[in-house]
Image (cartoon, rainbow, N blue to C red):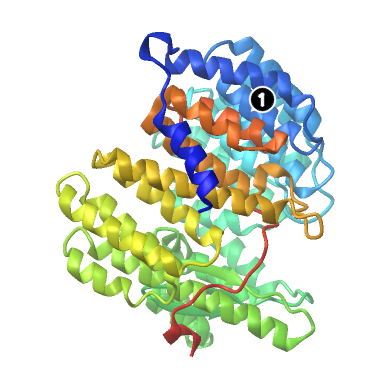
């Protein structure tokens, strides 16, 4: 870290405002939100919708009516011109519906269905339906599901939440599931198989068998001329690759086939080695995969150049290996920390090694602060070998968190300083005039790094964390970070750390992995 920046941050962190003159965290949050509201109009067009959404989400703590207005402004400003904008609209709808159901549904119905491909409204409709179910507004939820299905993709996930809420024997179960079966018949979707697997025992006699027969007929009879991009599932249990859409879709329903028609199950496995292998590793089929920690799933799209596809496949395989070994270490840590550290050494990625060591320290922080502190020192020592700032920010974030848990404020302060410095380095890359990050600032790696630093600083310093905003020179990033700080002071969690368009570099691997 540059000496000047270190000095400035030390001053910012070490010179608090006298307690008698400090606002409460809630008062400071309101000040930050109000100042952000005034600044948003001057930000870039692609920053405004995200900033307004975050502003609206947090302003409900003070003025629900104003919060709804900000949500509506965010929705209008976002538009639906590209995938990111449409996804942001759906997130706005979900957040607004939690505050004002009628307004959220009204905006959801304004999002046009795509002509082809994934219907991003499915995410929003499922979440809104889930909210309605929680409020026992079952009929409104059913009506919304039917409306969404009539205008685009049927919200199978949302319908699953309705079925989960209805008591056994309720006549609405058969009616709701029949609607889903009809929607599947008109426009097949793998989501229907998941729905059937989860709720088959609630269905009237014979309905599950009828639905399974419909799925099998659809999967086995469909002739698709499109090239199938092989899909790989890799975890600590093993790795399987589906080379056809048929095998991948059958995988989702094989446990049900086994339960209802064992002869048909054995016949399908005997003629499909890939499917047979998958069922040996994941006996619960598709629905069980999401519960497998450390799982990596990926596809490789053919580019016409086999060398490029091979390179992508190789990187994804390495990432799967890294994830699986990292998860194995975390699973072992509560029972045997020493064994977990031995497993860390087998992770073929120095950044992930440092992160997992810090996470193991987190697990020890409550009952063994001394051991946690030793592990943090070990993780910090490993940081010297990490040459890319985006490899370091998550580790500094975890170190700052754990340092706070063990009441080592000096170490927490140092980690925040280093995190701020790396955020600054990432900003130089994001804003480089020759290779500028074209994604909206909401998704810049530097924005997310600044957010991490401010969240940790708010935990450590409370309202004094505001001083760090002066170090964020980009006006748009400053507005986004300002709202995040307000959110942290309100003790509301923040989990939107997705990044797009950052500077790409080869993954940092151990010497053994490079050989």
Q: For the point 60% across and 59% down, which residue is it?
A: 190
Question: Is residue 352 depicted above or below 127 in this figure?
Answer: below
Question: Which corner quadrant of the image does residue 166 belong to?
Answer: top left
Secondary element type, mark 1: helix
Question: Is residue 215 depicted above or below 86 in this figure?
Answer: below
Is residue 220 in view from this perspective? yes
Q: For the point 70% across and 46% down, which residue is it?
A: 120
Q: Residue 19 placed where, x, y %?
A: 36, 14
Is 105 or 210 nearer to us in this picture? 105
Is 182 or 83 nearer to us in this picture? 83
Is 302 or 451 nearer to us in this picture? 451
- Mark 1 neighbour class, 10 Å CA radius: few under 14, some 14 to 19, many 20 or more: many
In the rendered picture of this protein, how many numbered marks are placed on residues?
A: 1
Question: Which corner quadrant of the image does residue 238 belong to?
Answer: bottom left
Is residue 177 in view from this perspective? no
Q: Residue 298 placed where, x, y %?
A: 58, 70
Question: Which corner quadrant of the image does residue 101 belong to?
Answer: top right
Q: Residue 425 placed where, x, y %?
A: 60, 53
Question: Is residue 425 depicted above or below 388 in this figure?
Answer: above
Question: Position of 6 compared to 426: left or right?
Answer: left
Q: Disc 1 designates what residue? A: 104
Furthest residue to the bottom? Answer: 515
Question: Position of 196 compared to 78: left or right?
Answer: left
Q: For the point 58% across and 68% down, which residue is it?
A: 249
């Amino acid at each position: 870290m540059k000496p000047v920046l270190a000095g400035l941050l030390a001053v910012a962190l070490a010179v608090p405002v006298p307690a008698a003159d400090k606002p409460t965290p809630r008062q400071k949050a309101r000040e930050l939100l109000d100042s952000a509201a005034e600044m948003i109009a001057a930000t870039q067009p692609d920053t405004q919708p995200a900033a307004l959404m975050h502003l609206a989400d947090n302003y409900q703590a003070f003025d629900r009516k104003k919060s709804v207005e900000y949500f509506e402004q965010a929705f209008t400003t976002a538009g639906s011109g590209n995938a990111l904008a449409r996804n942001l609209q759906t997130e706005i709808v979900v957040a607004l519906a939690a505050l004002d159901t009628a307004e959220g549904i009204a905006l959801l119905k304004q999002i046009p269905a795509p002509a082809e491909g994934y219907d991003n409204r499915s995410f929003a409709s499922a979440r809104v339906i889930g909210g309605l179910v929680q409020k026992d507004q079952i009929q409104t939820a059913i009506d919304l599901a039917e409306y969404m299905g009539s205008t685009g993709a049927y919200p199978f996930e949302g319908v699953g939440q309705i079925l989960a809420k209805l008591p056994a024997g309720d006549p609405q179960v058969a009616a709701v599931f029949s609607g889903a079966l009809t929607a599947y018949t008109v426009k097949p979707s793998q989501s229907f198989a998941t729905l059937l697997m989860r709720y088959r025992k609630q269905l009237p006699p014979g309905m599950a068998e009828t639905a399974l027969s419909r799925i099998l007929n659809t999967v086995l009879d469909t002739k698709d001329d499109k090239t199938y991009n092989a899909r790989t599932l890799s975890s600590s249990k093993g790795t399987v690759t589906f080379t056809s859409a048929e095998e991948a879709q059958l995988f989702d329903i094989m446990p049900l086939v086994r339960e209802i028609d064992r002869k048909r199950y054995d016949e399908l496995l005997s003629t499909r080695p890939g499917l047979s292998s998958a069922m040996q590793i994941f006996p619960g089929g598709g629905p069980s995969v999401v519960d497998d920690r450390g799982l990596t799933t990926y596809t490789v799209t053919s580019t016409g150049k086999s060398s490029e596809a091979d390179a992508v496949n190789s990187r994804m395989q390495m990432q799967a290996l890294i994830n699986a070994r990292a998860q194995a270490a975390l699973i072992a840590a509560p029972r045997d920390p020493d064994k977990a550290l031995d497993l860390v050494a087998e992770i073929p990625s120095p950044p992930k090694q440092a992160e997992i060591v810090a996470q193991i320290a987190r697990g020890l922080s409550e009952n063994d602060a001394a051991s946690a502190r030793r592990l943090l020192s070990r993780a910090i020592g490993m940081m010297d070998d990490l040459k890319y700032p985006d490899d370091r920010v998550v580790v500094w974030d975890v170190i700052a968190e754990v340092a706070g848990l063990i009441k080592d404020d000096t170490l927490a302060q140092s980690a925040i300083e280093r995190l701020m410095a790396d955020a600054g380095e990432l900003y130089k890359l994001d804003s480089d005039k020759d290779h500028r990050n074209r994604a909206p600032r909401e998704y810049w790696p530097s924005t997310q790094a600044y957010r991490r630093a401010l969240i940790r600083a708010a935990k450590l310093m409370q309202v004094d964390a505001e001083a760090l905003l002066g170090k964020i020179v980009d006006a748009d990033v400053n507005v986004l970070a300002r709202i995040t700080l307000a959110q942290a002071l309100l003790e509301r969690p923040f989990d939107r750390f997705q990044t797009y368009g950052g500077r790409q570099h080869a993954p940092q691997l151990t010497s053994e992995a490079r050989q």
